[in-house]
Image: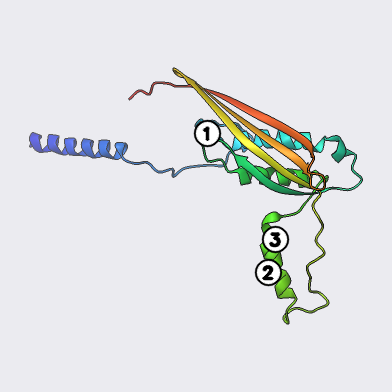
Amino acid sequence: MRTRISLAILCLGMTFILQACGPKAFTKGGYDDPNRVILLDDKFNENDMQLISNQLVDSLTQFGKIQNATKSPVVMVGRVRNHTSEHIDVKSLTDKIRTALIKSGKFRFSDKEARDELAEEYEYESGKFVDKKTGKAPGKQIGVDYLITGDVASNVQEVGNDKVVYYKVTLNLNNLSTNIIEWSDDKEVRKRYRKQSIGY
């Protein structure tokens, strides 16, 4: 009888250990403040994106030619190249910057990615299904004054248990008429990490 009880306890114990060592799912969660800095790993994250975009937006909105402009210039986001060794969602970064610049009231933006859809809609509205009085035709779009381009770079230094990760985002405001860079700025983020032994 004691042998059977001991065997049952052993089986229950092994089952518990196997369940504890198995894969775990994130089943419990809650909302968090997106402005609170959380560093779960050493990759480019939303905190880096927010810090860099806020600083670049402040710099561009305070640029003399923009502050003194009699009307809001029309801007388009061009190519921002990722020169790092990791995947960085550059589009999310430029979308965040564009949204903040529009909210400032100092810029108007032309959407490069919507060109094909606009051309398709012009073609549809010129057909028999749309009232000619309300249909929109090509040829009335506003030309772009400036093009935003830039680069994302990084550098990683690792010695012993210490690791330093550095990111730099550079943006340029190119005058479309003259190809002159009217404004340029870069913002940096440096993060330091230390390896810790994990006990079992």
Cα distance between the residues tagged 1 and 2: 40 Å
Verify CB contact (< 8 Å) between mark 3 and mark 2. Answer: no
| Quadrant in which residue 33 is drawn | top right
Circle 1 SS class: loop
**Is 94 situated above or below 133?**
above
Mark 2: amino acid = Glu
Instruction: Determine the secondary structure under disc 2.
Output: helix
**Crowdedness near tag 3: few (<14), some (14–19) or many (≥20) residues, C-alpha within 10 Å:** few
Mark 1 or 3: the one toward you: 3
Disc 3 marks which amino acid? Arg
Q: CA distance from mark 1 to mark 3?
A: 34 Å
From the viewer's side, name the closer residue of 185 and 93.
185
**Could you tell me the amino acid type at mark 1?**
Lys
**On screen, 186 above or below 91?**
above
Residue 47 in percent (x, y) is at 61, 34
Q: For the point 81% across and 74% down, which residue is it?
A: 134
Nearer to us: label 1 or label 2: 2
Name the residue tied to disc 3: 115
Quarter of the rendering occupied by the C terminus: top left
Question: Residue 141, which numbered label?
Answer: none
| Side of 119 relative to 161 (left or right) | right
* Residue 19 spot, x, y in % from top left: 29, 40
Earlier sequence position, callout 1 versus callout 2 = 1
Mark sitting on residue 43: 1
Pick the residue in front: 6 or 108.
108
Residue 56 picture location, percent across and down: 72, 35
Residue beneath disc 2:
120
* Residue plotted at (53% across, 42% down): 30
